[in-house]
Image: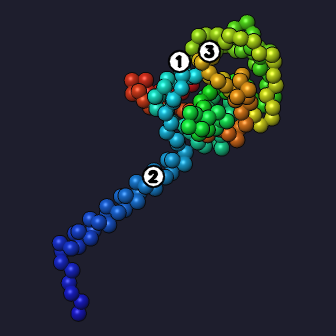
Amino acid sequence: MEPEIKPKNRIISRGVLIWARDVAIALLIAIIIMQFIKPTIVREHSMLNTLYPNDYIFLSKQAYTFGEVKHGDVVVFHSQLTDEKGVKKNLIKRVIGLPGDTVAIHDGSVYLNGKALDEPYTKDGRTDGVMSEVTVPAGELFLMGDNRQQSTDSRSSDVGFVPKKNLIGKAVFKLFPFNDMRVIK
């Protein structure tokens, strides 16, 4: 005959099992969420007034697995630029040109396929400088920051056209600061 388990031990054993189950469920949910969403902190001024340094945003890592990149999307990508420690930087920019599009800059405007863009999201409401018309190569994107005077982007040879494969995700939601929580457009 086996010794009888005392009720107190049974309660403790059951409590441990419930706790372990809850931890396992929480970890599973966290892993699933991290496959689709990447929390990110904005570090630079290149996306003013859309995003500010220290804004906390969420990226959709699967946005382009299930859909196509669109004009106006705000994206984060791996760049060839490095920080002061020599680590490659991730940048955040807006999609201006898709493969096959032509992009030019003159008279304070960006021209996409020969037509001036209406860009209410830009910090200064205009894009200074001149850039001769370029055609976006297959598989690549032309990206620009919203703060055109302070953005190192596809206009610069340091960034140039960005391969679609370098995209980390689409910026979809601004969580912090809480008083400016919103969907990113």
State which mark lies toward you, 3 or 1.
3
Q: Residue at x 77, y 15 (%)?
A: 131
Residue holding disc 2: 29
Could one spot residue 134 in this view of the protein? yes
- C-alpha separation, residue under disc 1 versus residue under disc 2: 34 Å
- The amino acid type, in three-letter code, at marker 1 is Asn
At x 26%, y 70%, the residue is 13
Query: Where is residue 62 shown, x and y percent of the image?
Result: 60, 43
Q: Is residue 171 above or below residue 14?
A: above
Q: On the image, which quarter does residue 164 sit in? A: top right
Q: Residues within 10 Å of mark 1 (few under 14, many from 20)?
A: few
Give the colour scheme of this rendering.
rainbow
Residue 173 in percent (x, y) is at 50, 32
User: Which residue lies under the disc numbered 3?
Assistant: 149
Residue identifier under label 1: 49
Q: Earlier in the sequence, mark 3 or mark 1?
A: 1
